[in-house]
Amino acid sequence: MKLPIYLDYAATTPVDPRVADAMMQCLTMDGNFGNPASRSHRFGWQAEEAVDQARHDIAELINADPREIVFTSGATESNNLAIKGAANFYAKKGKHVITVKTEHKAVLDTCRELERQGFEVTYMDVEENGLLDLKKLEAAIRDDTVLVSVMHVNNELGVVQDIATIGEMCRERKIMFHVDGAQSAGKVKIDMQALKVDFMSFSGHKVYGPKGIGALYVRRKPRARLEAQMHGGGHERGMRSGTLATHQIVGMGQAFKVANEDFDKDHAHISALRKRLIDGIMSDIEEVYFNGTPEQSVPGIVNISFNYVEGESLLMALKDIAVSSGSACTSASLEPSYVLRALGRNDELAHSSIRFSIGRFTTEEEIDYTVQLIKDSIGRLREMSPLWEMYKEGVDLESVEWTHH
Amino acid sequence: MAYSDKVIDHVENPRNVGSFDKNDPSVATGMVGAPACGDVMKLQIKVSDDGIIEDAKFKTYGCGSAIASSSLVTEWVKGKSLDEAGEIKNTDITAELELPPVKIHCSILAEDAIQAAIADYKKKHGE
């Protein structure tokens, strides 16, 4: 077993060897290096064929038409293109947009930009379990609402929003519906024929593909329209100009193909490891809090807060495992995770949260090592924690007068 | 964030972790910080009849710098008189541990903890 152990698959994944092989065929003189837009020779035709195959493989995972796939540089760009592109296209109908406070920054910051352009944006609260209350969403919809953007799977918590029902609500009212699917592709079954989603963003590198490539699903029937954000040679049916990066696209296509073929295997493997991790931690350590909702969650993401232990010191103690923390203490800002705050978690619990994300290459041995390391570290840090001592003495920490600084 | 080897050493091998009986007349306690701010330090000193700090213990809830600052302070105050201990400045701690600028508040908190412990001792002994 190699240390440190990688448990940050929600941040990014290693490229699957099957994907790397396919990509390497598209780089050198002997390979498929041509410009897919070149129409006058076989270098171009072959590259175009490889791109078409990738488009087909990506569409297949989500049960869509290949012509509904627009390649971008990643999910951030896809989110920008869908949200700004659709809001601007439909601005004549209204200038109100709805999104959620726990969205990824790529959605939130794009919505902020729309506000600067004169749109009005409603940022919905979530319930304690991280999920939207659909009645509240319905109440927030107005006559001038043109776009709703809700992520499928939350990147910090793993909770799965009910995009099927939200899609129905939007379609009935002729409102465009965008979904950030960066964390859901390959983890949740996605059926674009059944879902009433107009735009959906995808990323290559969350699915064992390369970084720097993503896609935006743009519905054909009924037709979803957007204004291009990147102008140039009119690639991707005018929606996103720029020479198609054959090797990246082939990588993403192969990654989605593998995700489709291995879906059940991956799901079973990751679910078993998730159970092992949660059981190991929750059964043996007091004062741990599960963030999110286990009933409606992807198996790969486990977010847990350890009370009376501070986040950065916990991360330092866990240096043999690569995880993410809800505490931004390691950066210049001292703000804890805005996602955990949105659930109503207090600052202390938000600061002391750890996101474990499990993937295709995680092993049982790695999970067992992690559980033992967590137990030892939490024990050691609590021995050192005055808050733990007070808790054990029965002191109500809420009643203590702290010297704020 | 890149911490100095000294910080890492204090975090991995903290000195003098623990508690004294706070009702012991020779023991004084200083507790500073707040959970919502991300750090709470408890520093306890055990003072001899002639006013020398014989022993010190700490418990800290906080980041690596906060743990290292309080661990270091327990080493520094031992053997000092109350007045000498009161002269320890946060800048001494920052310099010794090579704390990054965003973590200077941890050294200030450690200085505050010493002052709070000294004040508690004086209060206990009617000074």
Image: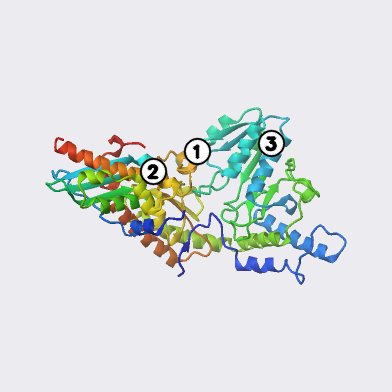
* SS state under label 1: loop
The first of marks 3 and 1 along the sequence is 3
Q: Is residue B23 visible?
A: yes
| Mark in front: 3 vs 1 | 3
| Mark in front: 3 vs 2 | 2
**Residue B105: which numbered mark, if any?**
2
* SS state under label 2: helix
Residue highlighted by disc 1 = A126
* SS state under label 3: helix
Left or right for A338, reference B82: right
Left or right for A226, reference A265: right
Amino acid type indicated by mark 2: His
**Separation of residues labelled 3 and 2 (CA atoms):** 44 Å
Along the line of sight, the residue nearer the viewer: A351 or B103: B103
Left or right for A275, reference A58: left
Q: Is residue A392 visible?
A: no
**Separation of residues labelled 3 and 1 (CA atoms):** 23 Å
Crowding at dot 1, Cα within 10 Å, few <14 / some 14-19 / many 20+, comes out as many
